[in-house]
Amino acid sequence: MGKKGEAIELDAGGRTVRLSSPDKVYFPARGFTKLDVARYYLAVGPGILRALNERPTTLERFPEGVEGESFYQKRAPKNIPDWLPTARVAFPSGRTADEVCPTEQAAVLWAANLGTLTFHPWAVRRDRPDHPDELRIDLDPQPGTDFSDAVRAAHELRAVLEEHGLRGWPKTSGGRGLHVFVPIEPRLDFTAVRRAAIAVGRKLERRMPDRVTTAWWKEERGSRIFVDFNQTARDRTMASAYSIRPKPHAPVSAPLRWAELDDARPEDFDLATMPGRFAEVGDVHEDLTDHAFVLDALLELADRDERDRGLGDLPYPPDYPKMPGEPKRVAPSRAKHHDHEGQE
């Protein structure tokens, strides 16, 4: 792992943050150190703060680097600085936690000192923790598909959103997928926002039946892009824009302009290359926070799906309590097996 070096102090927006063991290697394949991670987050500071600002945020920590053990820190640690606010969030289990809510760039650096590589913000702000202000659509490539398939789906998704009076901002996931975020007025609860996500996913699926699916069960997805509607369920989070992902080459989740999608490659955006891009073009999602759309048209679409097509709710993740109107959480192949046994 190499020598770790003495602690240093870094300036983040006028606040001094201590960085211990700056020479500790976090990405052995490329030699990136903890200091490299901290300098990266300073370089993209305004962008990641825009993505995290006032949001309850889970920290994905790798204290010994990307090859060491990791964990998700949902509860703010006891040694949290007095200048870093928290917000109480409720999980589907009914339990609560006080999560950190970054409001300045120093908070990102403080988290990086704890070994945080990826930031997972909720789709809410701390003053309205039960009302999302973003509709987040996850285009997740399944086996047999790749990033180019996600791009194709994203272009059609853009058209679907615009037909319903909405605008999305795309970013790479840091892996093979794409995320599209739509800023919304924080007046709906998680259930209603998830319902809107299902409606837009089904619309996209009807447009591209051979390329897109909303099937929750993997056995039904095939080689298609899965619209992961459950990423909009309460307490589900996505890696923030500019977050480093825990892979050997240190990729990052890169905000993109729509016009860049066709030429973009996820591997082009990493800890080494993103600071240069940020210095050149800035935060290309900076204007996202200037907008707040309403989801009425998508909820009307959901109503029509239910009324005209008989399409109701879809399964929740397995750790959720049973939700009203939710279908059985049994994979179709198992359900058929049970039905067959019952007939014998």
Image (cartoon, rainbow, N blue to C red):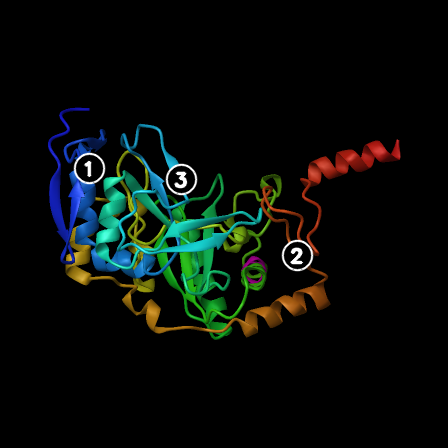
- Main secondary structure of the magenta stretch: helix
Q: Disc 1 residue type?
A: Lys
Q: Circles 1 and 3: CB distance less than 8 Å?
A: no
Q: Disc 2 residue type?
A: Asp
Q: CA distance from mark 1 to mark 3?
A: 18 Å
Q: Of the numbered discs in the image, which one, if any, rests on residue 72?
A: 3
**Front in this rendered view, residue 220 or 166:** 166
Q: Magenta stretch: residue 204 in it?
A: yes
Left or right, 166 with reference to 333: left
The quadrant of the picture occupied by the N terminus is top left
Among numbered discs 2 and 3, the one appearing first in the sequence: 3
| Residue 115 spot, x, y in % from top left | 27, 38
Label 2 belongs to which residue?
A: 313
Q: Circles 2 and 3: CB distance less than 8 Å?
A: no
Label 1 belongs to which residue?
A: 34
> Magenta stretch?
200-205
| Residue 44 spot, x, y in % from top left | 21, 54
Q: Disc 3 residue type?
A: Tyr
| Residue 113 spot, x, y in % from top left | 23, 41
